[in-house]
Amino acid sequence: MTYSVKELFYTLQGEGAQTGRAAVFCRFSGCNLWSGLEKDRATADCTFCDTDFIGSDGDGGGKFKTAQDLANAAKALWPTGGKPYIVCTGGEPLLQLNAPLIKALQAAGFEVAVETNGTVEAPEELDWVCVSPKIMDKMVQTTGNELKLVYPQKNVQPEDVAHLKFDHYFLQPLDEEGKDHTDSVIEYCQAHPKWRLSLQTHKIIGIP
């Protein structure tokens, strides 16, 4: 299959359990909860996305004809040393990320992580699964390494997902213009210590 990638770049993971870790980010095009067009936002299943995932014209993006082509492009971004780590995100990466690509990335030395909305089952070959739920009645991936819930949101509450089988539970303040939800997340985490605060540190320090 051909993989459509919006952007492919080297940075630090800014969120969740792997915050601060060097990583290649592979942002796949497309999502099943929003078209990415502003005219459709109000009626979408997910209305608060802050990411451009339309097309394949971003930095390092493009159409990759084979899994090996994409793995080679990702490996070229990794410097010498350390354990190569790649975060597959979107949009919804599991619309494209499949076992052949995961294996090609692993063969290139990468530990392979995914950030998914949980509406598509994650391949068992993945090394790290982070689920960020957006709508409960479409959620099928209910286990993983990390659950990262944007808070507050209307479709999913912490109590809806606290019973699921994850190693880590994070609340991340909703990035909403004119409003700062950090205090409400802090308050919730203090009252419910199963949960930990996740901040978008990449935005705070000004990296991609």
Image (cartoon, rainbow, N blue to C red):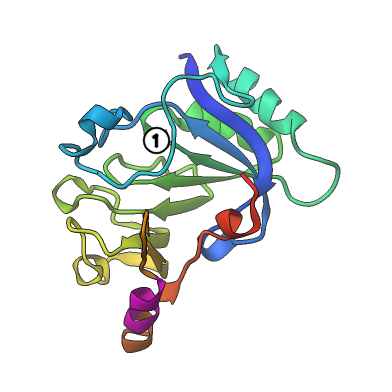
The residue that disc 1 covers is 91
Pick whichever, 74 or 39, lies toward us: 39
The extreme bottom residue here reads 191
Tell me where residue 115 appears, x and y as whole percent.
Answer: 44, 47
Residue at 50 percent of width and 65 percent of height: 199
Q: Residue at x 56, y 17 (%)?
A: 62
- Quarter holding residue 143: bottom left
Can you give x and y, in whole percent of width and height, for residue 127 in the image?
A: 54, 49
Identity of the residue drawn at 33% across and 32% down? 31
Residue 200 in the figure: left or right of residue 84: left
Of residues 45 and 120, the one drawn nearer to the viewer in this rendering: 45
Task: Judge whether residue 161 is colored magenta.
Answer: no
Report the span colored magenta.
Answer: 182-188
Vertical order, 152 against 44 (above or below): below
Q: Residue furthest right?
A: 80
**Label 1's element?**
loop
The amino acid type found where label 1 is placed reads: Gly
- Residue 17 figure quarter: bottom right
Image location of residue 104, percent across then percent down: 61, 29
Q: Is 70 placed above or below 41 here?
A: above
> For the residue carrying disc 1, how many other residues have a C-alpha within 10 Å: few (<14), some (14-19), or many (20+)?
many
Q: Does residue 109 appear to the left or right of 179 in the view shown?
A: right
Pinpoint residue 46: horizontal percent, then vertical percent: 25, 44
Count of marks, rendered view: 1
Quarter holding the C terminus is: top right
State whether the magenta stretch is mostly helix, strand or loop. helix
Compare residues 67 and 77 and report the one nearer the observer: 77
Residue 187 part of the magenta segment: yes
